[in-house]
Image: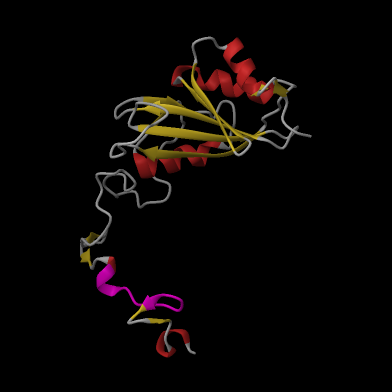
Amino acid sequence: MPAPMEGLERLEAVRIQEKFPGAVVEVKSFRDNLFVCVKKDSLREIALFLRDDRDFEYKLFSDCTCVDYSKWEHERDLPERFEVVYNLFSLKYYSRIFLKVGVNDGEKVPSLIPVYEGANNSDREVWDLFGVVFDGHPSLKRFLLPEDWVGHPLRKEVPLGGEDVDFAQGFRGPAVEDISMPHAGESFEGKTGSEDVAGR
């Protein structure tokens, strides 16, 4: 069953704008996916509405991710440095909606754990890698990185590589390119793969 429409617009976008006047910054559609940019203060209420409304039933929290736009010089949906993107799935229509909120350094985003318990690990991952703080999260701590890691590696100010790495045991390790080896399928010296590496 396709997602419901009202004229040329997805019904979800129309209803959100009616129920939460002033909360929607922008609505976009791309490849049958709906992107709704909302103010972060209304995020939790909008997610709760989408989950519980019998016309939509967005009961599955698929994912939450983040993008650092601090070095991006092109058109953007939101003016803040970070965009936190929530991927919700309707069990009624098998359709997706993406809620997007903007946040700057030092600001907090409301955690969606009160609405979707599945937001727990996604919140921790985004905080771990980007440093975005989720207000109301019960245990915001390292998720993918060691507990003594300093900083958040997916921020744009973090170098891409080439520098030695500080390990928790107190020693510095070599940069990735110092120890990288070619592998099967990788082009080097005018060839793709090699007998030494690929066993061909």
- Residue 35 on the magenta segment: no
Where residue 4 appears, x then y in whole percent?
73, 26
Left or right: residue 72 compared with residue 144: left
How are the residues colored? secondary structure
Image vertical order of residue 144 relative to residue 27, above or below = below
Image vertical order of residue 53 relative to residue 197, above or below = above
Q: Residue at x 71, y 24 (%)?
A: 5
Q: From the image, which quarter does the N terminus lie in?
A: top right
The one nearer the camera, 131 or 158, is 158
The one nearer the camera, 120 or 100, is 100
In the image, the segment drawn in magenta is: 177-187
Magenta residues, dominant SS class: loop
Left or right: residue 8 compared with residue 160: right
Q: Quadrant of residue 128?
A: top left
- Residue 180 on the magenta segment: yes
Q: Residue at x 60, y 11 (%)?
A: 18
Name of the residue lying farthest toward the right: 1
Where residue 110 appears, x then y in whole percent?
46, 24
The one nearer the camera, 9 or 36, is 9
Where residue 2 appears, x then y in whole percent?
75, 33
Where residue 38 appears, x then y in whole percent?
48, 22
Name of the residue lying farthest toward the front: 8
Q: Residue at x 40, y 27 (%)?
A: 78
Q: Quadrant of residue 133?
A: top left
Image vertical order of residue 19 relative to residue 194, above or below = above
